[in-house]
Image (spheres, rainbow, N blue to C red):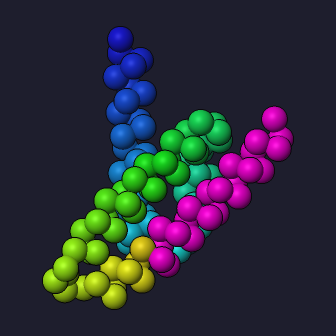
Amino acid sequence: MNELLELNQRLSYLQGEFVNEVIKRGFWGPSAFLEEKEITDLDEIIFLQKYLRHVSKQFRKVWMEEGYENYFEAREINKRNFRKHDQELTQIIKTKRSQL
């Protein structure tokens, strides 16, 4: 049971860290994050990508609402940060799958 709790804690931590880095740094390349956190498992990388997509989708719902003050800034953040990271993660996943 402790192993399951530790796994949950690790994955939750990685999700939060990854999204924080994407938002704070702009585009810096997820490969650096994966290397720094020693993430090599394909399933974990896919998990992070899906989580990033979910956060992006939820963020999009907020800034697309009528009257959102920072619409253009939010749109640029979404394009510059989330989309570029998603593209690089897609390439990393394709490369890993081809190595299997």
Magenta region:
79-100
Q: Which residue is situated farthest in the top direction here? A: 1
User: Is residue 63 shown left or right of residue 47?
Assistant: left
Instruction: Verify whether residue 96 appears in magenta.
Output: yes
User: Is residue 45 shown left or right of residue 98?
Assistant: left
- Residue at screen point 57% across, 44% down: 46
Q: Which residue is situated farthest in the front direction here? A: 66
Nearest the camera: 67 or 19?
67
Q: Is residue 32 visible?
A: no
Q: Which residue is situated farthest in the left direction here? A: 67
Task: In the rendered view, tell whether residue 67 sits above or below residue 7.
Answer: below
Q: Which residue is situated farthest in the right direction here? A: 99
Asked where in the image residue 96 lies, by quadrant, the reply is top right
Count the marks: 0
Q: Quadrant of the N terminus?
A: top left
Asked where in the image residue 84 lies, by quadrant, the reply is bottom right
Give coordinates of residue 50: x percent, y percent.
49, 48
Task: In the rendered view, tell whether residue 25 sits above or below residue 89.
Answer: below
User: Is residue 65 shown left or right of residue 48?
Assistant: left
Give coordinates of residue 52: x percent, y percent.
44, 55
Nearest the camera: 68 or 26?
68
Q: Quadrant of the C terminus?
A: top right
Asked where in the image residue 92 lies, by quadrant, the reply is bottom right
Q: Is residue 45 visible?
A: yes
Q: Magenta stretch mostly in which secondary structure? A: helix
Nearest the camera: 16 or 90?
90
- Residue at screen point 59% across, 36% down: 43
Give coordinates of residue 36: x percent, y percent.
57, 53
Instruction: Verify whether residue 61 appears in magenta.
Output: no
